[in-house]
Amino acid sequence: MRQANQNIPTQKTQFGGRLRTGAPLVTMIFIGLNVFVYLLQWIIPGFTKDLVLIPAIAAYEPWRLLTSAFAHSTGSFLHILMNMYGVYIFGMLLEPRLGRLRFTWLYLLSALGGSLGVMLLSPATTATLGASGALAGLFLATFVVLRGNKQALRQMAIILALNVVLGFVVSGISWQAHLGGAVAGIVAASCIMLIPRSNPQRSKIQLSLLGALSVGMIVSTYLAVESAKWPLA
């Protein structure tokens, strides 16, 4: 029976990941992490200050490059509510099509891209937080996948409009993070979606391209962090 099960071909998603049934687990995990961090921000005094991304000190506290993408403004519940609504909508659309591994990679690269955008384009003392960079990457990836689906595009337009409004009414949200996340997301999505299904090496090529993109972004982020840091007195 074990041998027979091994001979059963693994079912694939639309873009080459392993097909799984049930709720999109990775999407729920990311939403849970954001909500958990948000609760800690309310419970632990000063916790938010240890999470936000400030370019001038990122070289000394590099965790901020990722933790800032899981923290949200405690001054507006709408901030996390709209971001998590967007992650849920796009996760429901993308994760079943990409598979868990590719979706996780896309999300994290988009989050890092948002931080890289802040490092390159924001003033050195600006404090930034929120999942907006990751959300922008998911948005662009979803646009590529569902560009022919008018109903889905209308939902996306609503979420985009609300996030643009949030950028003006909630402090700590930056267009730099949106731009960086969007660029990282569309490039990561292209690494996954533009490899033809007919290519027998499809999965290997996808993962190799994502790996190369990850290395390139990490190096770029390191250089941006080093150029933005303030010397210690």
Image (spheres, grey):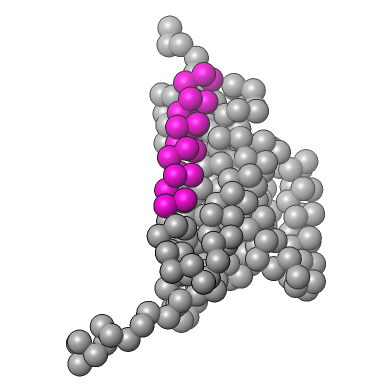
Which x, y percent locates residue 159?
74, 59
Q: Which quadrant of the structure image shows residue 1?
A: bottom left
Q: Residue at x 73, y 66 (%)?
A: 147
Say which residue appears at 58% left-offset and 45% top-offset: 184
Label the magenta part by its dominant secondary structure.
Answer: helix
Q: Is residue 214 magenta?
A: yes
Q: Along the horizontal axis of the image, is 49 left or right of 132?
A: left
The residue closer to the viewer here, 157 or 207, is 207
- Look at 51% across and 47% down and name the residue there: 109
Note whether residue 18 is visible. yes
- In the picture shown, does residue 21 fall above or below 101? below
Q: Residue at x 20, y 87 (%)?
A: 3
Residue 71 can be seen in this image: no
Q: Quadrant of the C terminus?
A: top left
- Residue furthest toward the front? 199
Viewer-proximal residue, 139 or 217?
217
Residue 103 spot, x, y in % from top left: 50, 61
Coordinates of residue 210 in the picture (x, y in percent): 46, 51
Q: Is residue 151 above or below residue 79?
A: below
- Relative to 25, 83 lies left or right: right
Find the magenta span and give its range: 208-228
| Residue 78 sits inside the magenta stretch | no
- Residue 172 lies, with reference to residue 159, above or below; the image says above
Q: Where residue 81 sits: x, y (%)?
A: 64, 58
Quadrant in the rendering for residue 113 = top right
Quarter location, residue 17: bottom left
Of residues 113 and 44, the one nearer the viewer is 113
